[in-house]
Image: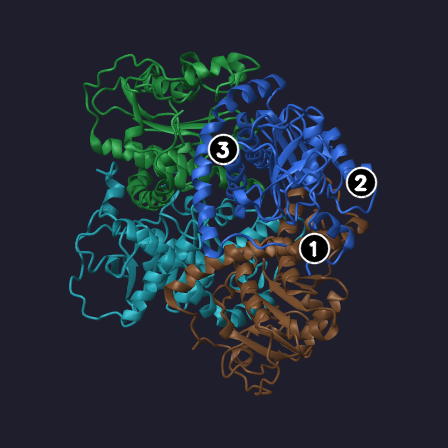
Chain colours: A green, B blue, C brown, D cyan
Amino acid sequence: MHQNNAEAATSVLPATDSRPDRDLPVDPDLLRDLVTANHILYDQGVVDAFGHVSVRHDKDPGRFLLARNMAPALVTEEDIVEFDLDGAPLNAAGRGVYMERFIHGQIYRARPDVIAVVHSHSPSVVPFSVVKETPMRAVCHMAGFIGTGTPNFDIREVAGDGTDLLITNNDLGKALAKTLGEKVLVLMRGHGSTVVADTLKKAVYRAVYTEVNARTQAAASRLGEITFLSEAESETTSRNIETQVFRAWDFWKQKATAACAALSNQFGAGQEL
Amino acid sequence: MHQNNAEAATSVLPATDSRPDRDLPVDPDLLRDLVTANHILYDQGVVDAFGHVSVRHDKDPGRFLLARNMAPALVTEEDIVEFDLDGAPLNAAGRGVYMERFIHGQIYRARPDVIAVVHSHSPSVVPFSVVKETPMRAVCHMAGFIGTGTPNFDIREVAGDGTDLLITNNDLGKALAKTLGEKVLVLMRGHGSTVVADTLKKAVYRAVYTEVNARTQAAASRLGEITFLSEAESETTSRNIETQVFRAWDFWKQKATAACAALSNQFGAGQEL
Amino acid sequence: MHQNNAEAATSVLPATDSRPDRDLPVDPDLLRDLVTANHILYDQGVVDAFGHVSVRHDKDPGRFLLARNMAPALVTEEDIVEFDLDGAPLNAAGRGVYMERFIHGQIYRARPDVIAVVHSHSPSVVPFSVVKETPMRAVCHMAGFIGTGTPNFDIREVAGDGTDLLITNNDLGKALAKTLGEKVLVLMRGHGSTVVADTLKKAVYRAVYTEVNARTQAAASRLGEITFLSEAESETTSRNIETQVFRAWDFWKQKATAACAALSNQFGAGQEL
Amino acid sequence: MHQNNAEAATSVLPATDSRPDRDLPVDPDLLRDLVTANHILYDQGVVDAFGHVSVRHDKDPGRFLLARNMAPALVTEEDIVEFDLDGAPLNAAGRGVYMERFIHGQIYRARPDVIAVVHSHSPSVVPFSVVKETPMRAVCHMAGFIGTGTPNFDIREVAGDGTDLLITNNDLGKALAKTLGEKVLVLMRGHGSTVVADTLKKAVYRAVYTEVNARTQAAASRLGEITFLSEAESETTSRNIETQVFRAWDFWKQKATAACAALSNQFGAGQEL
């Protein structure tokens, strides 16, 4: 009853799992961390009812883990599904999956160094995605990973006018991965952004600080001309400050776990499609 | 004791119900969803002490359901009143009703396709209502329903200078419905906005994302020239993304129910007029 | 140990009560409402650790009621002190009192129609107080009481350069009351604002909506030229919409009581000076 | 496993305590206040996972107290470490310490009048740090301590391009202290700010109101030309209003203790490095 469009329905309706056997068990700690990552991204205001975070399988680089189609704040270990890099679910067992899982699969394929991916509509980043004359740049030391410019993916240039702006197939996923290139952050015009890292905790950290940097840059731009981080400062801050990611993770985890437990105590888990 | 103005009092004081018998029972699920809609709109920051949401009666298109005169966060099933399309209460039983129920009735009359209506003063939308040179447009894929422009109802042009800006009778309701036309959103100068949909859940979704879009457009306008959604993108995003309304509703319901239960545990229901 | 300035200390140190006998008992409901008003103003973000609200004594127009020197969120009935219109405490019994009680006394003296006074540093109003070229005006129907302009009290014009910007004596209180004149709202340069009404509930409502209007006007001013409420619209909205103050009060009371109870359960009442 | 950079690691890895014996016991009230200060700064939005507050030892001006390397909201008395003015830990006992403890040590050395130091990235202050043409000034009476201008430390001018912007050694600490000079607040380009005071409670108050002033000045600058506090007003407000610091402290303590207790009940103390 929720689908009023056949095309969109195809990508959210339960798909037949391409490889129903789950031979390589995921590290249980990684699974728990992925649940925590969902909760932190909600609690820190990066995702709300929409947005998603994935991690590459620790034993099979050709697979990744992502929640079924639901709000991140409500995700539990039972909601995590395995996918191959084409976005085909391996153990969905009839559950609905995210329409935009192709973002994750195609970035993992194009970038062997990437271990985790966050896609969000975080509120201060979307404005930058629709103003091409003002690129997002690192303004503060916590966001050195952004560097001196951010690619902006405009789906209209790739797929023409009249799309739904979503990355709903592998071709669009490949095009987005191409725009990302070797960077860690890509804006998506009128939509949001996607950020990557070589660890799950770092990807969460970067998603949070992408939002902080956007808010800071927007505020600074109203005060006058900005002294941005230089290329060299971006590199050094990123390298040194990201040694401290654990401090943020540990604290955010504590906050988020409390916040999401309070939500889940009310009703039990989210509702199936 | 709260009324110090006879004219205003007329429309809030208990009215004699025009048809005291309630022959067609509403679907109990719809009634529960209307209570949830009130709570979600509060919890998402669309309404506070003011604002209201209605749904058309599922068995009689000539009636609609709306809470009695109270804050949305406190509404329970017992607070829902039936109205005819002229805004006459059918079972108020002496309870005060909203001064602006005519917004709902006249839109249901003019637009047979409309099943639900949300009227609010959501904070980022009011600024657009008072700046005529800057129309609200869809800037992000979640708000494609806004399209490439939004009508703005200035009561001064219809009823002259010196009104209270409220839609307190059927003539003003008709004028507002006329400005809305076939659109889904109408701004109201110095007052707020009204948004409609063909389901209750979608109307709630649109009210929330009208506020998100306003915030995003305002922020983007300070960064430079905006690439808005095209007409074709607005149509496609609206059609495809609104298949995912259930995901937002399920999550928002869980959040809002917890938040409003905490409020109601303090005192019991809101106070009668 | 907290006083490092003799002059300031004079006005916060316990004063000898000028009339120690409390012959005219206050209406207990009014006393409870004054406590609630303190809590609402905190919960709605109008006051934080600073700011205060008073009400005129219901049996003696030459007295008013105001909390002792403490944060509004923590005020209980036991913390309310009676004052005469010169700001002399009648039953402080050695407790510290607000340095700026003269705001209240001198407005009650100059304006027999005023029953309640709120003084705050609410965050969106202070910016208007320091930018004289941009007067605050009513932009939305809920804030019609603001009208088409707001007087701005600059203490430097009255008391010269080098003051502490506070209204710490009766002469400054009189000067402020003179700038307020017959209006309901006066800005105070670099400091905040003071708003009055003929009922306590209405004064609280106006303090909240002064903040809302400031936020809305600031946001609108960044979008383009604003259509403000006309003089006639300001009058009609104020007269009609303020019949609905009870709806906001009842809801805000419920929210604020829950929030402040959670605070007080931790430690008991605030600490004495 | 968290260190992927040898240089940065040096300053966070457990250091050998330079004087393992703790001969001069700190006043237990001061220790408790330092824990409270950590919690208040978190609850008031000045620090999040990062930022820190220290106090000079009450019996040995050549030592100061600062938490080990962790999020302020989670700090307990057991987490407080003593340092000498070179930033060498005296009783870390193998625990990780903040990379930027040199901010504190070198300011205590340069400024015998300073008893407490807060370093933060509070969100409205960072934009001022990157826009040199718009200095932060006191706009409201609560922030008179800021005065008529604020020094801005640009590490690039001291240590050249390509640093990580952090104050990770005594030379950088000395350079920062030199830029601070006899002021109470110094901005740090692309990084944050540091504020000092002659009591711990006042330093916390100033850190909170530095953020409030930044938010107010930014908002006012969009409305037109600002009337700032004069030099004389800055001095008088600072002197008189800071007699009321206890009122803020008592209230903020109550709020923060509740908020942080709720966090700590979930997991116990933060995780070791």
> Is B197 or A123 nearer to us in this picture?
B197
Q: Is residue D54 above or below residue B106?
A: below
Q: Residues within 10 Å of mark 1 (few under 14, many from 20)?
A: many
Q: Quadrant of the N terminus of chain D?
A: top left
* Residue ranking furthest to the right: B160
Select label 3 or label 1 by which is in front.
3
Q: Is residue D36 left or right of residue C11?
A: left
Q: Subunit of mark 2?
A: B
Residue D102 in the image: x percent, y percent? 32, 54
The circle on residue C242 is 1
- Check chain identity for marks 3 and 1: say if they share one: no
Q: Is residue C116 above or below residue B244?
A: below
Q: Secondary structure at mark 3?
A: helix
Q: Position of residue B45 (x, y in %)?
A: 54, 43
Residue position for label 2: B156
To which residue does mark 3 refer? B29
Tell which tag, 2 or 3, sits nearer the viewer.
Answer: 3
Residue at figure coordinates x 45%, y 53% from the top left: B265
Circle 1: element type: helix
